[in-house]
Amino acid sequence: MLSPDWLSAALSPRFPGVEVASTTVTETLQTMATKVRFDVEYANATVEAPPALCVKSYFGVGQRYRATAGLGETKFYRELASTLSVRVPLCLYTGIDSDTGNALIVMEDLVASGHTFLTALSPYTVEQAAATLDQLAQLHARYWGDESLASFSWLRPKLTSITSYITPEVLQEHLDGSRAEGLPDAVRRADRLNRAVLRVVERSANDVACLVHGDAHAGNLYETPDGLPGLVDWQVIQRSSWALDVSYHIGAVLDPELRAVAERDLLAHYLDRLAAYGVKPPSWDEAWFNYRTALVYGYYMWAVSRLVDPPVITEFVTRLGTAVAQHGTLDLLGT
């Protein structure tokens, strides 16, 4: 995969005549996917290709069974990323194996160029959240109400499929366990939570559709050398309601106490940024209701999670579950 011949062929459409002399791995990261950072030496010194790259795929031990998980992200970089003004890594090559469905992305190594990747539990300020909401507003505004998104089958909303991820009985075991310890009993009932998710599916289908990142917690963000946010890890990209991104982001990145103080101002900031990007935003009452009900999306995502480190799962279930409880989200959804 990192052979000079293969990489030369992969880079040649963007950099005609490029010849890779050698590659040197600098770091290998294995989480849900495998990411390999490597330096590149070019045989032709005049080439303008980046000197450090990163490849992402699902070829690690135990990852091949979920190889198709990268299809959405690969198609995002292949078909939509270039149409957006949001900050994303420079993607140089995408590939999809026709036999296995395994997807592969080669992008610029942002770490080598001075960018900083955050972790899922990186401390996050209100100012950082506001900056990320500006990026999300740009993302949403680009295809706000654009019916052309319906032609991308891989952008179908994810909530319905996520509800089949585990049975209600297993979900109840999760909610009875340590991940939801300390949350009120009212938000630890799998039957109510499942019904609430289906209500959000119904409401989102009637809302203005746009392009949604779907998983904008701190671990899927990076910062430029100037401290500006960018978005990575687009596996859950979908066509759905803006509120999924906004409620998930605010609820996931901020401690509950800080979120409770700042969320109204942050939502107002997001609506202002939507208007600045040419979209007529929803009214405050509509936006506030949709924000509070969409909180169930992030809470459910983490309540069903099984392949992430337990401390991360517990923190996100606590943060988002607390928001759901404080706003009476399940009651608002009539479950």
Image (tube, rainbow, N blue to C red):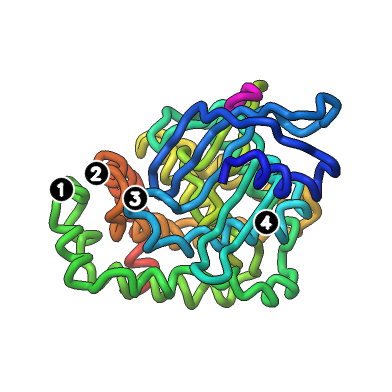
According to the picture, the residue beneath numbered tag 3 turns out to be 61
Our reading of the magenta stretch's main secondary structure is loop
Which amino acid type is shown beneath numbered disc 4? His
Q: Is residue 273 visible?
A: no
- The label shown at residue 140 is 4
Where is residue 282? Give x, y as percent: 66, 61
Distance of label 1 from label 4 (alpha carbons): 35 Å
Q: Which of marks 4 and 3 is in front?
A: 3
Looking at the image, which residue is at 77% across and 33% down?
Answer: 49
Write the start and end of the magenta stretch as one range. Answer: 111-115
Tell me, for residue 178, which label it has, or none: 1
Which of disc 1 and disc 3 is earlier in sequence?
3
Q: Would residue 112 be counted in the magenta stretch?
A: yes
Q: Which residue is drawn at 42% across and 44% down?
A: 252
Q: Mark 2 points at which residue?
A: 310
Which of 76/208 is in front?
76
Q: Is mark 3 on a helix, strand or loop?
A: loop
Please, what is the three-letter code of the amino acid marked with disc 2? Pro
Determine whether label 1 and label 2 are within 8 Å by CB: yes
Q: In the drawing, does residue 314 fall left or right of residue 78?
A: left
Q: Is residue 63 above or below residue 154?
A: above
Closest to the observer: 195 or 115?
A: 115
Q: Is residue 211 above or below residue 205?
A: above
32 left or right of 129 in image: left
How many other residues sit within 10 Å of disc 3, few (<14), some (14-19) or many (≥20)? few
Magenta segment includes 227? no
